[in-house]
Image: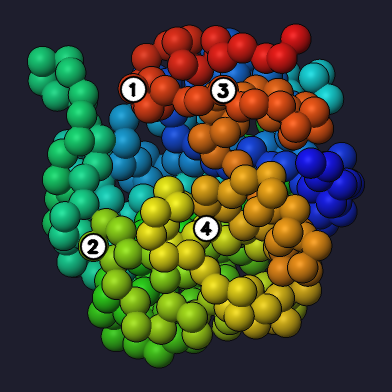
Amino acid sequence: MAYDSLLSPLTMGKLTLPNRVLMAPLTRARTPDMVPKALQQTYYAQRADAGLIFSEATNISPTARGYVYTPGIYTDEQEAGWRGVVDSVHRAGGRIALQLWHVGRISHHKIQPGGQPPVAPSALRAEGANCFLEFEDGSSGQHPTSTPRALETDEIPALIDDYRQAAKRAKRAGFDMVEVHAANAYLLQQFMATGSNKRTDRYGGNLVNRARLVLEVVDAVSEVMGADRVGIRISPFIEIFGLSDDESEAMAFYLAEQLTRRGIAYLHVNEPDWTGEGPQLTDNFRRELRKRFPGTLIYCGHYTAERTEALIRDGLGDGAAFGRPYIANPDLVERFRRDSTLNEPDPATFYGGGAEGYTDYPTLS
């Protein structure tokens, strides 16, 4: 089958992408000291045929962490490490965006600075949620999250500045774009959702107030990068990590309208169940979202080449981000071009470890 739409160029803000096959942000837990090194340079450069690579979620500050072995972008050493990754991707002809991450309440005091509680919009524990810790015996694994403390109103400007400083480091490192991670039940979505935000200040209560923080973050990052080099990831209707939201659709539509006014490069929408086994977004929702956000619209979550081709041809989206297919197929674009069989990913090597299951998947050549 020919994938003419999927393999056609795409203008996304300041960038012109050679195709619409994007590499999804994938936490792989392979930076024990939080600094990307040669292994990450190889991994990302191998996948430079993507129209755009979204980096793994990257902590914007020490309080942003909820998972050990994930990288940061708040020290000089981390910035230098990412510069090496960006240079490797660019030498291979690719483009890469850095995803800016704060987990909020999906964390534990054992990996927070000074053993303090994680921060969140409200002091509500994420019921049934786990973070990822290193234990005293040197092993690592999932562990229930701690009860967070609510951010004080006068602390929020410093939080926004953490995003701003992370964007400055990303720009110095040479990233083509940055993506604000406002999805998957992490901090910014915790502020937006009715179930996790019980605040009574200007960041809580009605929908406009609950959206205030994410829009202020987008504005701060856009001041650094330019709005046409900024995107955002959202996940309407998602129910993970104890998140609930009575106004998920209304929030998605309000954000789309506000982001259109700001002229950002793209909107990246994660399916409610990205494994493909649960509910998916409806075409009616996509049509309504498209009306409110006429810019570049990317979807992610168990997409195939065929499904994405139809999405583009129907005018409902402009491309898709592929996760697990990119784990196992560094040359995914070429495989789609040839309509070749895909390698199957090994879930046992998704998280942690070294080159095995990371940089050793075979290419067609």
Name the residue that disc number 1 marks: 348
The residue under label 4 is 270
N-terminal label among 3 and 4: 4
Residue 317 in which image quadrant: bottom right
Give the Cα distance between marks 2 and 3. Answer: 34 Å
In three-dimensional space, the C-alpha distance between marks 3 and 4, rounded to whole angstroms, equals 23 Å
Tell me the kind of residue under disc 3. Asn
Q: Position of residue 255 (x, y in %)?
A: 58, 76
What's the CA distance linking mark 2 and mark 1?
Answer: 25 Å
What secondary structure is marked by label 2?
A: loop
Nearer the N terminus, badge 1 or badge 3?
3
Q: Is residue 62 above or below residue 187?
A: above
The quarter in which the C terminus is drawn is: top right
Q: What residue would you read off at disc 3?
A: 343
Relative depth, front residue between 362 and 211: 362
| Residue at the farthest left position | 137
Frontmost of labels 3 and 4 is 3
127 lies left or right of 231: left
Residue type at mark 1 is: Ala
Q: Residue furthest front?
A: 1
Q: Is residue 159 visible?
A: no
- First-in-chain label (1 vs 4): 4
Which residue sits at x=49%, y=41%? 57
**Disc 2 to disc 4, C-alpha distance:** 17 Å
Measured in 3D between alpha carbons, the distance from the residue under mark 1 to the one under mark 4, in whole angstroms, is 23 Å
Q: Can you identify the residue that label 2 sits on?
A: 242
Q: Amino acid at mark 4?
A: Asn
Residue 265 in percent (x, y) is at 76, 59
